[in-house]
Amino acid sequence: MTQFSSYGPRAAPTAQHTRPYIDCRDLFKIYKRADLEVVALRGLDLAVESGELIAIIGASGSGKSTLLNILAGLDRPSAGQVMVGERDLLDVSDSDLVVYRRSEVGFVWQATARNLVPYLSVADNIELPMALAGQPAKSRREWSGELLESLGMTEKAKRFPYQLSGGEQQRAAIAVGLANRPPLLLADEPTGELDIENADHIFEMIRGLNRAYGVTVVTVTHYVGVSQFVDRVVHIRDGRIGSETFSRPDYRRDGGTVEDEYVVVDQAGRLQLPIEYTDRFRHGGLAKIESEGGQIIIEPPDSNPRPTRNRS
Ligand code: ADP
Ligand code: MG
């Protein structure tokens, strides 16, 4: 019998399952159009643990949507490795990919209109994927009711999408994404069309659902305030992971989060710096590089000079 009061054990890692839930290694995606090749992902490495909530940030064209579409089973990678749970998405049959898309992932798009069927009520939108998966009516209603309640949308169950605000539409879209209790929720700029207040609200809700149901979440966003809602922010640059920022709730200060950004050496052996550094170098000219006591210190040229030591 299907469990309906909780998400069930699917998202939990098994004893022998030591690999991260999402494991991308040296992942490539090359789009070919006529005689033109676009390398959208070039050797991307990314590991996401089961139950983790991460945000992916990066400039337009850096490969964020390409990565999400591959994880969603909407697009196939060109080379490398991409495992989600026990599934190898580089070597999966078309029919298995259909099963994967239907039951293993929920997806929220940026465009609110793309997420909901316009002529169905909010409740019916949420129950549609469950009906397609063969769930009986009573359990469909119970689960859509629970999701709507978690999202503060109980009063809006009978409304049609056009009768909702943008933020409410995205909340309904998240409920649709979770309808079949997927272990993975993917969202591509889910707050791209919302103001800051609504964006905060949406990320707060995503975090609440992540904590309540243990669903792993990967969200792409441009919203700079996202770091306070997620476990980790991953920066993607030119189809590779540039650097990572870990939010540590135990170091919270003034409602904000202290972050450590780690510098990463990329596949070509180049050092990738946190974006604020590269911005400062861009505006201030070349960096100063010093070697001191086995440590290399890289400083933007416009930074305050450190007290000079008496070298004589
Ligand atoms: P982002 O979501 O970070 O803005 P995308 O993943 O959409 O970036 O795109 C990464 C690169 O791949 C871009 O150069 C884009 O033009 C190219 N690209 C994306 N989708 C396709 C496609 N279907 N055909 C050809 N090129 C594509
Ligand atoms: Mg995109």
Image: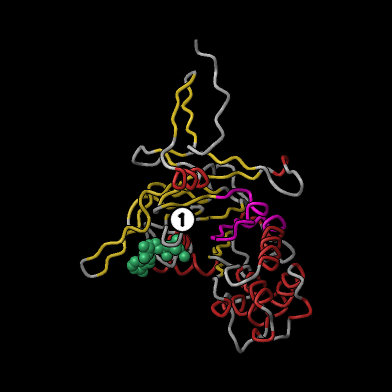
Q: Residue furthest top?
A: 312
302 drawn magenta: no
- Magenta-highlighted residues: 210-233
Horizontal and vertical percent for residue 171? 67, 71
Q: Residues within 10 Å of mark 1 (few under 14, many from 20)?
A: some
One can see residue 236 in this view? yes
Three-letter amino acid code of the residue under disc 1: Arg
- Which picture quadrant has residue 60? bottom left
**At x 27% / y 65%, what residue is drawn?**
32
- Which picture quadrant has residue 306? top right
Quadrant assignment for the N terminus? bottom right
Horizontal and vertical percent for residue 250? 73, 40
Q: Quadrant of ligand 1?
A: bottom left
Q: Which residue is mark 1?
A: 87
Relative horizontal placement of residue 100, taking residue 26 as reference (left or right): right
Relative horizontal placement of residue 171, taking residue 42 as reference (left or right): right
Coloration mode: secondary structure
Horizontal and vertical percent for residue 83? 45, 52
